[in-house]
Amino acid sequence: MDNNDSDFKIIVNSPGNFIAKEIHISGDVNISSDSKSAKQNGYTDEQVAKAIEAICGEGKPLHEKKMWAAVYWCLRWYCNFPVKGTDFCERIAKLPFTKVLEPACDYNNIRRLILLSFMNMDCHDLNSVKPSKSDELFFAECRVVLLALLEELGKAVLPKL
């Protein structure tokens, strides 16, 4: 095995897990994103912000403060956004939005809602998510927002024709 004391970078440009075998490092290791466009499961901050902007506002799926809980549910499972509500809202605040969002993301508006049992279920397969009887109405509302957000995120990664 050769020793390499020079600086080097490993760049992975795809979503998913990266497994490195047989790499031996002595000294400090810093793993971070030095990119302005940090990616979460294949989506940049700009793409996530644009998708949220597209569904946010009067007459759109994200038109009530409480519906930010649906955005939380989606981004938690699809983009590895923070599970802790306060951290999620801080993460949303750091996204590069091009306009002021109305309604804005506020932890006080979602703190009880993100504790509902179905929020802990992976939303990749919505048909397998079974909310409690008392949560069925809110689940249906969240489903609309989640599907709209996923549609917008899908547009972000489709090739331009």
Image (cartoon, grey):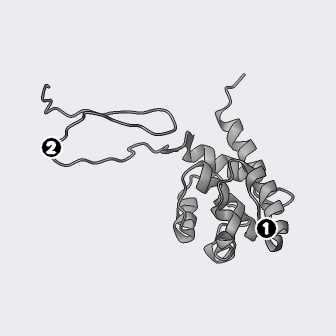
Residue that badge 2 annotates:
26
Q: Measure the C-alpha gap from mark 1 to mark 2.
A: 51 Å
Q: Identify which residue, 50 or 98, lies in the foreground.
A: 50
Question: Which quadrant of the rendered structure holds the N terminus?
Answer: top left
**Secondary structure of the residue carrying numbered label 2:** loop
Can residue 81 be spotted in the picture? Answer: yes
Can residue 62 be spotted in the picture? Answer: no
Q: Quadrant of residue 11?
A: top left
In percent of width and height, residue 57 lies at: 79, 59
Residue 64 tag number: 1
Q: What residue is at 68 percent from the left and 48 percent from the top? A: 124
Mark 1 neighbour density, 10 Å: few (under 14) some (14–19) many (20 or more):
some
Q: What residue is at 77 percent from the left and 65 percent from the top? A: 131
Q: Identify which residue, 155 or 10, lies in the foreground.
A: 10
Q: Quadrant of residue 59?
A: bottom right
Q: What residue is at 74 percent from the left and 70 percent from the top? A: 66
Residue 139's place in the image compared with 30, above or below, is below
Question: Which quadrant of the rendered structure holds the C terminus?
Answer: top right
**As drawn, is 124 to the left or to the right of 90?**
right
**Secondary structure of the residue carrying numbered label 1:** loop
Amino acid on which disc 1 is placed:
Glu
Residue 53's place in the image compared with 160, above or below, is below
Q: Earlier in the sequence, mark 1 or mark 2?
A: 2
Disc nearest the viewer among 1 and 2:
2
In percent of width and height, residue 32 lies at: 36, 47
Q: Quadrant of residue 2?
A: top left
In percent of width and height, residue 34 lies at: 38, 44
In percent of width and height, residue 138 lies at: 80, 67
Tally of numbered discs = 2
